[in-house]
Image: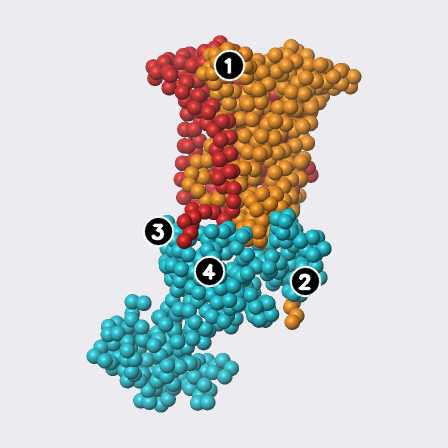
């Protein structure tokens, strides 16, 4: 018996495809758009606004960082306090990302693959750190662990330091980066459904086998995306960490806090040098984010079903 | 006879993952939240009222909420202009500008803070020409306003963008064929259908601006009763060990923010019933 | 392997997906679960597979309690409606999956796995696609790979959930025949779910007709078609003419007038008369129990389909008649039901 064979083309959406795009020089009387001069003005306003508010600040960071030359830049970065701030930032970010990655995976599995009541409430709770001011995020930990907090005296009597020490900083960072991985994974896994996992189970795979062989490869771009955003926030967090840190130089300063200290002491080159590292991190994050978004979109369009 | 029939799921691991999720959630979120609530209820209503209505606190709240509202409004208008240009037009560098819209979102707040201050200080690249015009930005409420605009840029743009992209061309063609000029089409047909998304973006920008700390405290003067934002006041109270005061202000901020967002959501739903989304 | 399902009940909230279902499946038979959406057929299939669990009832495989085990342990091969192929694995890896996840003690070595996969791909005639990804295959190909994957673990039964539902008509027909011949080749107990009665009647050894969570009738395709047990079955399978009639005093009345047909043991009261379109004998006026005027005639190959307005109550029915005597619009005809059933109107 023979059958017709047709190959199905994989369609990828071009993320640059926009609705009704028109170059600013297109015909004036086209009913689908505004007259040329208006288009020009609108574009000009948008460009000027973005340049003033976004491009210039970015440029200023690097201009100030290198304003005394490359030598000064690198010596600022190799300052022991700067290095310790960088180390602390990396350390805290690694812990936060690690913990929230595991959490994100388990939460996304529970929420996306099963039905239960209170799902909306759970998701709202997970989203909570997003809507809370960073200072309030720090505040809640001070209320628990501060000298006059609920557990403050107990901690002091046991000579345990949470606030004004690395554990406090880590906790605050974990709090503010809590939702990132879960938020990236939950809609993705919900969209992918449970069919492949059910197929795997029916073929005899165990839960872990199903997760590692079937689910994980399908969500890998989502995982990377969530980790990327989680990391960016963890490294850049200022408000919450500022409240719990105590600003002890060389010990409890993350990079953003170090920037603040240096800036307040008018050590502009040093401050902007560290700021430039953070700015570069932000730019790299944006580039990686765009690439990952492309992969995520592709996955949406070439469903294997 | 199978007694185990009934509440079983096909996929394994629900118990484990749910348990882990709830445990972690409790430790990181619920516990701290409980601390906040406990502290709040330690105060009597009169005490709360006294703290909140003290001159300095009121001023800080006014500064934070008032300027956040103004900044979000600016972002509403500018965001519309930006998203329109990015989605409907083509111009050199469009992709680049589309990408940099996310910068305020990705840039660490402290970096944004020092950068904006440097830019708008009296001797800054933008501060200097503005000073010639007699406009002082850094270390005044205007500076706060500027910083809040900065951090709110992505919210309106990114919320409206997908809606504008998905808008049906045929609607505009229908309007044109019915005799509407371009002005009418834009302001009576297209923009109204964007209202829900615009309101959402506004609410998000507003909420973010109210609670913003890092981007603002460098460029703000931080003078009590003049240019002091509410989050800074919370930090100051904490450093003075006046936990109750700090908590009171925080609670007011939270409640007020939620109220605003709630109001915007209702407005949005109302708008959606009048102007169905595409 | 023989399957026995006893008194299965499954509710979703207030909705009864399955309301006391009993079924016996003989070893090696190809069984169709046929019914409209919401009839519970997919739910029943998934319960047999272990992908869903009943609120009460029993399921046994060759006498053993199947509900005591999960889906992976029942030795069931399940083919999903939308294939559920692993999108990031090649065709080969998809088919090999079940063999690769077996516990180390039972697992075959790599060479045996490879050989078995090749064997199965040959069976479904898609060996040449083994390095492709699911997104590169057509719907029909994906379905056959899904089948090969399910067969790889040497299941005791094969369960297929609307296997051809997502395919277009021509491919569906071809795959139907292919499934039938495959079944004769491997002779595995198989159950498939479909809402397409033509499919069920063409492919299956026996058909289980379901509606609203209950089994209406179980029988061979012939039995279900020629001897429908309930009004639902009669109406669902094949095209039927349904006329509201009244059974009274040992006679049948339509629109107030008596019909000259036997009651055949139907209960008294408001009822429905079911006749197949092609079971209406057409003759000159007066030659049958019913009379009517032809409104419109269309020809389909060997038959002519006529719309006839009955004189009894003015309803318009469609009948199929052979083309030996041509009908024209306006003709008056007598219609005699050769074969018919009368069911109480409640059913």
Which marked residue is nearer to the observer: mark 4 or mark 2? Answer: 4
User: Viewed as shown, does residue C96 lie left or right of B162?
Assistant: right
> What residue is disc 3 on?
C14
Would you call the spot at circle 3 few (<14 residues within 10 Å), some (14-19), or many (20 or more)? few
Residue placed most toward the observer, C280 or B93: C280
Would you call the spot at circle 4 few (<14 residues within 10 Å), some (14-19), or many (20 or more)? few
| Residue C70, percent from left and from top | 50, 50
Which marked residue is nearer to the observer: mark 3 or mark 1? Answer: 1
Chain identifier, red in the render: B
Would you call the spot at circle 2 few (<14 residues within 10 Å), some (14-19), or many (20 or more)? some
> What residue is disc 1 on?
A155
Which quadrant of the rendered structure holds the N terminus of chain A? bottom right
> What residue is disc 4 on?
C63
- Label 1–label 4 contact, CB within 8 A: no
User: Viewed as shown, does residue B64 lie left or right of C95?
Assistant: left
Q: CA distance from mark 3 to mark 4?
A: 32 Å
Q: CA distance from mark 4 to mark 2?
A: 31 Å
């Amino acid at each position: 018996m023979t059958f017709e064979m047709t190959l199905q083309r994989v369609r990828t959406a071009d993320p640059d495809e926009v609705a009704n795009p028109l170059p600013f020089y297109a015909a004036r009387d086209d009913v689908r758009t505004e007259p040329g001069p208006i288009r020009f003005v609108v574009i000009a306003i948008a460009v000027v606004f973005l340049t003033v508010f976004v491009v210039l600040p970015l440029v200023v960071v690097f201009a100030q960082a290198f304003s005394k030359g490359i030598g000064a830049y690198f010596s600022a970065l190799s300052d022991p306090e700067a290095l310790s701030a960088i180390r602390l930032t990396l350390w805290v970010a690694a812990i936060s990302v690690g913990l929230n990655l595991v959490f994100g995976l388990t939460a996304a599995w529970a929420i996306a693959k099963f039905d239960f009541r209170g799902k909306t409430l759970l998701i709202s709770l997970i989203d909570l750190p997003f809507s809370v001011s960073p200072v309030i995020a720090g505040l809640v930990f001070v209320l628990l662990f501060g000298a006059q907090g609920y557990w403050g005296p107990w901690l002091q009597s046991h000579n345990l330091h949470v606030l004004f020490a690395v554990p406090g900083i880590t906790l605050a960072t974990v709090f503010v980066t809590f939702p990132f991985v879960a938020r990236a994974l939950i809609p993705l896994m919900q969209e992918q459904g449970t069919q492949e996992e059910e197929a795997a189970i029916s073929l005899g795979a165990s839960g872990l086998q199903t997760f590692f062989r079937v689910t994980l490869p399908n969500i890998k771009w989502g995982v990377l995306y969530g980790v990327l955003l989680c990391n960016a926030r963890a490294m850049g967090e200022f408000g919450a960490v500022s409240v719990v840190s105590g600003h002890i130089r060389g010990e409890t300063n993350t990079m953003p806090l170090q920037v603040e200290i240096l800036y307040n002491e008018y050590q502009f080159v040093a401050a902007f040098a560290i700021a430039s590292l953070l700015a570069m991190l932000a730019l790299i994050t944006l580039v990686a984010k765009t690439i990952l978004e492309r992969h995520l979109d592709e996955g949406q369009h070439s469903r294997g079903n | 006879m199978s007694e185990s029939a009934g509440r079983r799921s096909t996929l394994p691991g629900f118990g484990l993952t749910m348990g882990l999720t709830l445990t972690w959630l409790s430790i990181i979120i619920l516990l701290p939240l409980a601390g906040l609530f406990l502290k709040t209820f330690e105060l009597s209503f009169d005490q709360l009222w006294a703290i909140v209505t003290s001159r300095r606190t009121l001023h800080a709240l006014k500064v934070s909420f008032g300027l956040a509202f103004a900044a979000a409004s600016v972002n509403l208008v500018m965001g519309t202009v930006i998203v329109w240009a990015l989605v409907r037009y083509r111009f050199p560098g469009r992709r680049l500008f589309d990408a940099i819209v996310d910068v305020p979102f990705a840039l660490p707040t402290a970096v944004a803070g020092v950068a904006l201050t440097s830019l708008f200080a009296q001797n800054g690249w933008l501060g200097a020409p503005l000073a010639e015009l007699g406009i002082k930005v850094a270390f005044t409420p205007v500076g706060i306003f500027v910083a809040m605009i900065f951090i709110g840029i992505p919210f309106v743009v990114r919320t409206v963008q997908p809606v504008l992209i998905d808008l049906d061309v045929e609607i505009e063609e229908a309007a044109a064929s019915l005799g509407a000029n371009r002005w009418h089409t834009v302001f009576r047909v297209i923009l109204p259908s964007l209202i829900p998304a615009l309101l959402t973006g506004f609410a998000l920008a507003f909420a973010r601006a109210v609670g913003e700390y890092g981007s603002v405290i460098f460029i703000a003067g931080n003078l009590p009763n003049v240019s002091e934002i509410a989050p800074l006041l919370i930090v100051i109270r904490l450093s003075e060990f006046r936990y109750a005061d700090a908590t009171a202000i925080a609670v007011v901020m939270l409640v007020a923010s939620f109220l605003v967002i709630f109001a915007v959501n209702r407005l949005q739903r109302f708008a959606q019933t009048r102007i169905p989304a595409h | 392997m023989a399957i026995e399902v006893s008194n299965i009940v499954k509710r979703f909230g207030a909705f009864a997906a399955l309301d006391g279902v009993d079924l016996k499946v003989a070893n090696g038979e190809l069984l169709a679960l046929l019914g409209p959406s919401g009839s519970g057929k997919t739910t029943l299939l998934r319960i047999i597979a272990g992908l869903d669990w009943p609120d009460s009832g029993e399921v046994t495989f060759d006498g053993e309690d199947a509900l005591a085990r999960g889906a992976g342990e029942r030795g069931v091969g399940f083919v999903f409606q939308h294939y559920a192929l692993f999108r990031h694995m090649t065709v080969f890896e998809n088919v090999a999956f079940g063999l690769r996840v077996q516990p180390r003690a039972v697992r075959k070595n790599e060479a045996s796995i490879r050989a078995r996969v090749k064997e199965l791909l040959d069976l479904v005639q898609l060996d040449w696609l083994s390095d492709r990804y699911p997104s590169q295959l057509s719907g029909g190909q994906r379905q056959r790979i899904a089948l090969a994957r399910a067969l790889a673990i040497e299941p005791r039964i094969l369960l297929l959930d609307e296997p051809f539902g997502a395919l277009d008509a021509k491919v569906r027909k071809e795959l139907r025949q292919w499934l039938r011949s495959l079944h004769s080749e491997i002779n595995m107990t198989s159950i498939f779910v479909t809402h397409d009665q033509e499919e069920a009647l063409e492919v299956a050894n026996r058909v289980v007709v379901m509606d609203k969570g209950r089994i209406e009738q179980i029988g061979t395709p012939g039995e279900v078609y020629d001897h429908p047990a309930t009004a639902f079955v009669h109406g669902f399978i094949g095209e039927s003419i349904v006329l509201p009639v009244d059974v009274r005093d040992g006679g049948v009345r339509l629109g107030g007038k008596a019909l000259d047909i036997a009651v055949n043991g139907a209960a008294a009261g408001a009822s429905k008369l079911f006749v197949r379109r092609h079971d209406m004998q057409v003759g000159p006026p007066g030659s049958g129990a019913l009379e009517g005027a032809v409104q419109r005639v269309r020809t389909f190959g060997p038959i002519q389909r006529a719309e006839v307005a009955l004189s009894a109550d003015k309803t318009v029915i469609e009948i199929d008649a052979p083309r030996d005597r041509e009908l024209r619009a306006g003709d008056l005809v007598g219609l005699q039901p050769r074969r018919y059933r009368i069911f109480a109107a409640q059913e």
